[in-house]
Amino acid sequence: MRNRFTAIVISAALLSACTGGVQCFDSLIYPDYSDVTVPCNIAPLNFHYTGSGYGRCRTTFTVGDLKREFRGREVNWEESRWKQMLSQAVGDTIRVSNSKGDAWTIAVSSDSIDSYLTYRLIEPAYEVWHEVEIVERCIENFDETVLCDHRHTGNSCMNCHIHGQNRGDYSLFYLRGPKGAAILNRDGKLSRYNLKADGMVSSTVYGELHPSGRYGVFSSNIIIPGFHSNPAGRLEVYDRQSDLAVADFDDNQMHISAQFSRADKLETFPCFSADGRWVYYCSADTAALPENITRLKYSLQRARFDEKDGYLKGEPEVVWDASVSGGSVCHPKCSPDGKWILYTVADYGTFPIWHTECDLQLMELSSGRTLSLENVNSDRSDTYHSWSSNSRWVVFASKREDGQYGRPYFFHLDEDGNATKPFVLPQKASDFYEKYLLSFNIPDLGRTSVGFTCEDTATIKSNADEK
Amino acid sequence: MLMKSKETLLKVAASALFGLAVFLFFRMAYPYHLHFQEQCQMFLFSSDYLFDVISMPGGLSDYIGRFLTQFFYQAGLGAGIIALLSVGVQLLTFSVCGRRTLMEYSLSFLPSCALVICMCDENALLSPYIAIISGLSFTFLLSRSTKRIFRYALIIALEILLYLMGGGLAVIVFSVAALCREKDWRLAIACVAAAAASASISAYLTDLPFQRLMFGTHYYRYHNVTPLWPWTSALLLSALLLADAFGRYADSNRRWPAVVTLLAVFALSATGVAMLQDSKKEEMMKYAFFTRMQLWNRIIHCAAEKSPDTPVTVSCLNLALAMTGQMGEHMFEFFQNGTEGLLPSHQRDHFSPLPASDICWHLGFVNTSQRFIFDAQEVIPDFQKSAVCYRRMVEASIVTGAYDVARKYLEPLKRTLFYRKWALENEILLDNPELIESHPVYGRQRELVLKDKDFFFSDYEMDSMLGLHFVENRSNKAAMQYLLAWTLLNRNLPRFFECLQLYDGKLPKSYQEGAILYWAETHDSPEGMPSYITKGVYDRFVSFVSDYRSGNRQLVKKKYGDTYWLYYYGNN
């Protein structure tokens, strides 16, 4: 028997931190909307009691002299009545009590949240999928629009939809497979782009759109999936190579800078600063993978972006040093007011969704002060966040409920970086998340609707007029 | 009177014989196709599921078809259902005929036979049966007593209703029957227009292609395929009804021509079944079913009768041998196709992922088993969920401690007929997690999984992974057998010899054969040869070398067909 197995042996000590154990989710109500802060334009918070003996319970919502009472285990609001209560409670608190003696509050922030949320719905499967769609949900009610789905695209895979500066008329997503392309929604008009040029290791993968509307910054990644043997782990995804590139949508060109395409560096998850003059991204030294996967740690860096010619320039600056902090950073996103950058920290690697230790962390850009957002993070994966355009709300994907299915959670952030307890996207049926077996991927906020549907996507896919 | 009773007897005998033949075929010759069909769906007793299915045009026939398919869990019930439906279609076909002659009785078997032939395809569904039965049944609602305009209005209304319930097949069968009754070409035009309008409105409402809405939203597991045989059945039925209504029969009530026709129909159908049934797939499904049910001895028994030769069947056999501790002794008595026969590589089909999941499960690769089972469900062509897959996902989630996820999967299983009891039992376990460690299945599986080590699953490093599993848990004998088999099948004798040091106890035949071969390749004489190589194996090896050098391949194959040596030299 060989002494040294060529398989990658990851230390048990490391994994003891992510045993994937059971998180008891015993709250009085489901979903847990107790003692949360919600935006003044949120959809009704329907819920049900989880315990027995609530069949004849009376639940009372009070704000000022306005009262609303529900009987039974379920609390299902009529939208108009909920809006009425919400409008009374702006900047105040809704007090909730029931005949069993339980009481809690719902604080209603005067900060509204962007009204639209896009996400991809997919089984958390491995290599094969069938039901996949990108959906836009109006957060103010329960309306949904399918932007792209497998039925209209010949069962193509699709990657998630991102807004540029929370604009509904400026967004991008990918269609994969035959006739696949990056679909750019610019000024409400859909166009296909082939974002691959000579010198790039692959087509673009992760990225963000520039405030000017002309550019996008992307990483191109050779992505390798690995499947953990240990029950505590599951799927690991790492990059064998990754570089940065800038897409110029006006000139139909990809701009590649040598120092951001180095063979000895992995660069990924780029995003623009609020003013568009910097690109923040994650960077790590290349390593022999997968053997050294646990030593693969990404730092947060930034580089200057020259809007005139669309190139990344100058020497990168380290913003968050993995060698000092010990973790690995991914998915940075700058707040629209330019004050904060929010990112995810995992123990290692670049793919956080199956890392139970992976948490959100906030940094004040002016001072470099970091906030660990303890009341936001759970003991399961919390990642893939998006800012509201007023920088007061954040949505992120969390697997806190069961460790497997990602759900969109929201939290409020005040001027000083104080965050509130997260709450899950409200659904019409209070037991929706208990039954629903699809994951919500990459939730992204938009001020207005993107204005296209899956029929438009099907048309643009069949249209070979690719740029 | 006597003539009449003889005719009745003949009819009853023909229908009974037909039903019995269909039943026996599916029960005795084709049962694993039925199990396979059952594993590709999860019928739920819930209003959500009902509305989800019947909201599509043809949804009610689909719903009833799925309801009946759940009974395929037991092959006898499944065969009985197909037999009853087949006889039902035949009797209704005859009932709708106006003249009801003996000849028509014989010909009324044709639509049923086409449907039986259709069911030989594992992707065929029961919904065409239900659609045709509903189309034929609705003709009995037509009355001659009312005014023509009312009759026509009723026909059109029923046709639209049938479209929503049963889809295109139900509509065409009903329309032809109504046309034959009314004998008015204007009605035919109205029927076609109503069907096209129904499909067009549905296309607008559902975003489904018009063609699929016309030819059936769910008559076949592949949505983009219009199945031939159900439409052949409808065509035959229509032809029969049109001939009955408009044709000029000679004395078609004569007995002998009817009997001859009946025999010809049966013979033709038997030929069709013989041509279209797929014994290779049936064998694959049989091995997969036995593996799922852990009927190891039945697998070995089947293999002894006919050696399996596909990656799926060989891998099921090898698992059975390992689970009964016979791999080292007997594996080379059967055809071996390399390491593919230990764990089939990842395929995007709906045959191989399920047995692959079972193999990984029994070896202790719980995460990989879970991955295969996810994929097994995702590749079901009509996007249905699978109760069988859900069950394994519950098991894997319990073993990995993901109890919240396990509960999610248990919920739908609790709303099934045949998996409800199992789901409730497992829910009790989740409520009392302390019982899980001592549970015969989960306790054992938790022993098998790696606790201290982690690696990424790799098809290329199976030996390392198997070695780790065995080293960490010496009771995982299957991992040990797979480790040695992996090296032998890879013809990697140095690695085999290295791993052999881990083996305790009397060395099985194949291992001795591998060891002596390695010794012969690395030494000049038998002196110092390990003592675990018995004299019998040594003598046979000497004889093999001599015969092999003689170049008589036939003789070598005959004399040493059960040895590793023959596999090693590429003659297995």
Image: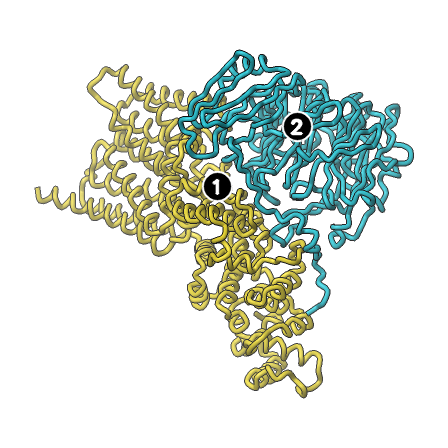
Chain colours: A cyan, B yellow
Q: Are marks 2 and 1 on the same chain?
A: no
Query: Is residue A129 shown to the viewer in this render?
Result: no
Find residue B71 and report its horizontal and vertical position in percent.
36, 46
**How many numbered discs, if any?**
2
Characterize the local packing of mark 2: few (<14), some (14-19) or many (20 or more) Cα atoms within 10 angstroms: many
Relative to A234, B188 lies left or right: left
In the drawing, what numbered circle is on residue A353? Answer: none
Question: In terms of depth relative to the viewer, which is nearer, B23 or B417?
Answer: B417
What chain letter is assigned to the residue under label 1? B
Q: Indicate the secondary structure of the residue bearing disc 2.
A: loop
Quarter of the view holding residue B415: top left
Q: Residue furthest front?
A: A101
Is B238 above or below relative to B82? above
Q: Residue furthest right?
A: A314
Q: Residue at x 53, y 34 (%)?
A: A27
Which residue was labeled with disc 1?
B385
In the drawing, what numbered circle is on residue A420? Answer: 2
Is A55 above or below relative to B419? above
Find residue B379 and report its horizontal and vertical position in percent.
54, 44
Q: Residue at x 67, y 51 (%)?
A: A15
**Amino acid type, label 1:** Lys
Find residue B446 and report its horizontal and vertical position in percent.
55, 57
Question: In terms of depth relative to the viewer, which is nearer, B114 or A445?
Answer: A445
